[in-house]
Image (cartoon, grey):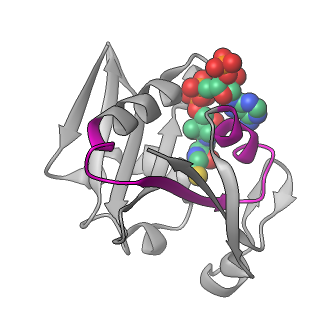
Amino acid sequence: MQIIKVTSNKKQYLPLLLLADEEEAMIDRYLERGIMYVLEDGDVKAECLVTNEGDGILEIKSLATLPQFQRRGYAKVLINFIEAKYKERFKILQVGTGDSPATVPFYQKLGFIRSHIIKNFFTDNYSHPIYDGGILLTDMVYLRKRL
Ligand SMILES: CC(C)(COP(=O)(O)OP(=O)(O)OC[C@H]1O[C@@H](n2cnc3c(N)ncnc32)[C@H](O)[C@@H]1OP(=O)(O)O)[C@@H](O)C(=O)NCCC(=O)NCCS
């Protein structure tokens, strides 16, 4: 297993990016300034993108494991890698996600704690209704972990 930094043609991983954020126009808002990593175990199995949000905050903008390889620990390996790599340079690792049983319990399991919400983020910013884990997403929920 290895984790590789992607420095060019990040859109080659669009199918993975779209798993985490299904509207490409929203991905385009952070793709260029984000630092992207892919986890290879044979082939690419998972992907993650992080951005510097200032004030010592590093944000996970995209994290996805191919559906047929979920629940095998790949995303956990990526988060552990990010934490180890950035803990000297950042104070907080945060993520914004829909209030969904498909994502929030995953981050809580890894030690993230609910921090704040952006009301109506999904209904205000996306061109169509977004469902995750059978839930219509409205607010963006932020979870944080101290590095
Ligand atoms: C969320 C996601 C990235 C998790 O990836 P994964 O590779 O399946 O996660 P892991 O196997 O590393 O799981 C780590 C731990 O969280 C647990 N977990 C994963 N998903 C969970 C869920 N929905 N509810 C509860 N626990 C969950 C795992 O059981 C595992 O627990 P363990 O350490 O005790 O074994 C994956 O489901 C995914 O790609 N979803 C679609 C894209 C997406 O929504 N991304 C998040 C955008 S914010």
Horizontal placement of 23 versus 5: left or right?
Answer: right
The quarter of the rendering in which ligand 1 is drawn is top right
| Residue 99 on the magenta segment | yes
Query: Which of the 4 quarters of the picture holds residue 131?
Result: bottom right
**Residue at the farthest bottom position:** 124
Q: In this view of the protein, which residue sits in the foreground, 145 or 127?
A: 145
User: Residue 104 placed where, x, y %?
Assistant: 72, 47
User: Residue 119 placed where, x, y %?
Assistant: 74, 81
* Residue 80 can be seen, yes or no: yes
Name above or below for residue 143 compared with residue 108: below
User: Residue 47 placed where, x, y %?
Assistant: 40, 39
| Residue 114 on the magenta segment | no
Horizontal placement of 88 versus 109: left or right?
Answer: left
User: Residue 144 placed where, x, y %?
Assistant: 58, 54
Query: Which of the 4 quarters of the picture holds residue 96?
Result: bottom right
Name above or below for residue 137 compared with residue 133: below
In the image, the segment drawn in magenta is: 85-109
Quarter of the image with the N terminus is top left
Count of all numbered marks drawn on residues in the image: 0
Kindly identify the residue that appears in the image at 33 percent across and 32 percent down: 84
* Residue 61 can be seen, yes or no: no
Query: Which of the 4 quarters of the picture holds residue 121?
Result: bottom right
Q: In this view of the protein, which residue sits in the foreground, 26 or 60?
A: 60
Horizontal placement of 58 versus 123: left or right?
Answer: left
Kindly identify the residue that appears in the image at 78 percent across and 73 percent down: 138
Quarter of the image with the C terminus is top left
Horizontal placement of 99 versus 146: left or right?
Answer: right
Kindly identify the residue that appears in the image at 18 percent across and 52 percent down: 9
Name above or below for residue 40 compared with residue 86: above
Q: In this view of the protein, which residue sits in the foreground, 98 or 115?
A: 115
